[in-house]
Image (spheres, helix red, strand yellow):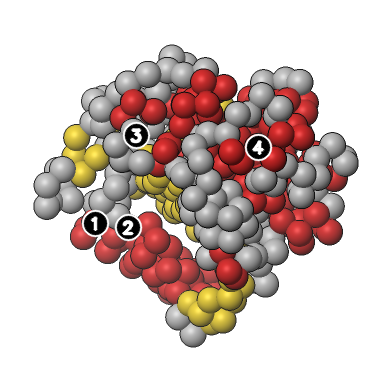
Amino acid sequence: MKITFFAISLLLAATPGYAQSKSVDKVVDSCIAKRNFNGVVLIAKDGRVDYLRYSGIANRHYGIPFSKKTRFQIFSVTKTFTAVLIMQLYEEKKISLDSTIAAYYPEYAGEAAHKVTIRNLLTYSSGRDLKEMDPRFIPEAYDQNLWEVDTFITRYCSEKLIDPPGTKFNYSNGDFIILGRIIEKVCKKPFEEVLRERILIPLKMNNTNYLHHEDIVRDLDEGYYNKGAGVDSLIMPTYHYIDNHFSAGAMYSNAQDLLVFDQAIFNHTLLKKATVDLMLTSYPALADVAFGFWVYPRKIGKVNTLFAERQGGGYGNESNWVHLIDKGITLILLSNTETADLNKMRLAVLAAYLDAE
C-alpha cells in the first residue's frame, strides 16, 4: 500500500496540471493571507477548467461561504455583453458602426447626436463631457435616485462635447448606456429581454441575468468596502440602485457561466469569425481598447502572449476576466471585497500557471 501511494504521489508530481495547481495555490494563498482575497479563481485551457478555487465569505451577515452556487455582481463586465449584442445587430445589418447616435435614437438631445458614431461609443471616444462619471454627481446618479433610462441619459449623458469624437479615450458608463438604449430602439424590446433571448438562453447561462435593485436572487453575494488601513476592516456599502448602471453594469453571473460566454466569443458561437476579429481589433491610439475588451501584446513571466481583458467593479464587488488569445487560456477572478488588487493578482496567477506548464 505504501509503495502504491508513493508511486501515485510521484505520478501526480510529474503531471503538469498538478504542478500548475500547486504554483497557483501558492499565489492564491498569499493573496488570501496578505490581501484578504474573498472570491473565486478559475483558469481554463481551451474551455476545460484546469483550476477552480473558492475562498472566503459571500455573505457576512449569515456567514455563507463562497461555493459553486454563488452568483457575483459583475458590474462593467456587462459592457462586453452589450458589445456582443451590438455586433450581432451589425452582422444582421441592423446597425452600422459608423452611423451616429441619432440614426437609431432620434430622441437623444446631446451635442453628440449627429457627431458621435457607434464605433466611438464602443471605444469610449465619444468626446462627451462625462457628467455621469464626475464624483460630484455620482451619488445622485447611482445612489440616491432611481431613474428611467431616457431620463438618466438626458440628465447625465447629454453634455457638450469637449473632444472631437474618436480622438481621445475617456472611460465612461454613459457611452455603453447609450448603446443599450440603441439596442432597445433597434430591437423594440427592453435590453434585458434582448440579452436573455440572444445570449443567456442560447448559451444556457442559468446563473447569469440582469439585476434590478428589488430583485431577490438566490445565492447572490454581497459586496464590501475596505475601511481604514487594514485589509480585514470591511463595511457594507451605502445603498445604491443597480438599475441605473443599465447596459453598462447591471448584471450578475458566476465564473463557470462567464467561461461559457468566453468560449462562445472566442470560438465564434455567437458571432462569425470575421465579426469577432473586428470586435477584437484594438485601437492603440485609444489605450488599446477594442469592442468590449482591451487587446494588446503582453509578457507574463517568461511568456509573450496576446492579452484580451475586461474588468468590472463597484460597491466592493470586483471582476477580472482575461483571455490569452494565442494560447486559449482563460482566467476569471471574481471577488466581493476590494482588498485584493485583482489587476496585480491576475498577473501573478497567470505567471505561476504559465511558468509551471
Q: Which mark is residue 138?
A: 3
Label 2: few (<14), some (14–19) or many (≥20) C-alpha neighbours in 10 Å = few
Residue at image mark 2: 341
Residue at image mark 4: 113
Which one is closest to the eye, mark 1 or mark 4? 4
Name the amino acid type tagged 1: Arg
User: Toward which corner of the image does residue 47 lie, by quadrant?
Assistant: bottom right
Q: CA distance from mark 1 to mark 4?
A: 45 Å
**Are discs 3 and 4 less than 8 Å apart at CB?**
no
Could you say which is closer to the camera, residue 240 or residue 126?
126
Name the amino acid type tagged 4: Ala
Question: What x and y, as percent, mark residue 96?
Answer: 81, 45
> What residue do we see at 57% from left, 34% from top?
110
Position above or below: 200 against 257: above
> What residue do we see at 80% from left, 54% from top?
275
Residue at the right extreme of this rendering? 93
> Sequence order check: which comes first, mark 1 or mark 4?
1
Which one is closest to the eye, mark 1 or mark 3? 3
User: Toward which corner of the image does residue 6 lie, by quadrant?
Assistant: bottom left
Question: Is residue 215 among the parts visible in the rendering?
Answer: yes
> What residue do we see at 63% from left, 29% from top?
108
Which image quarter is the N terminus in? bottom left
Q: Could you tell whether 46 is left or right of 60 in the image?
A: right
Label 3: few (<14), some (14–19) or many (≥20) C-alpha neighbours in 10 Å = some
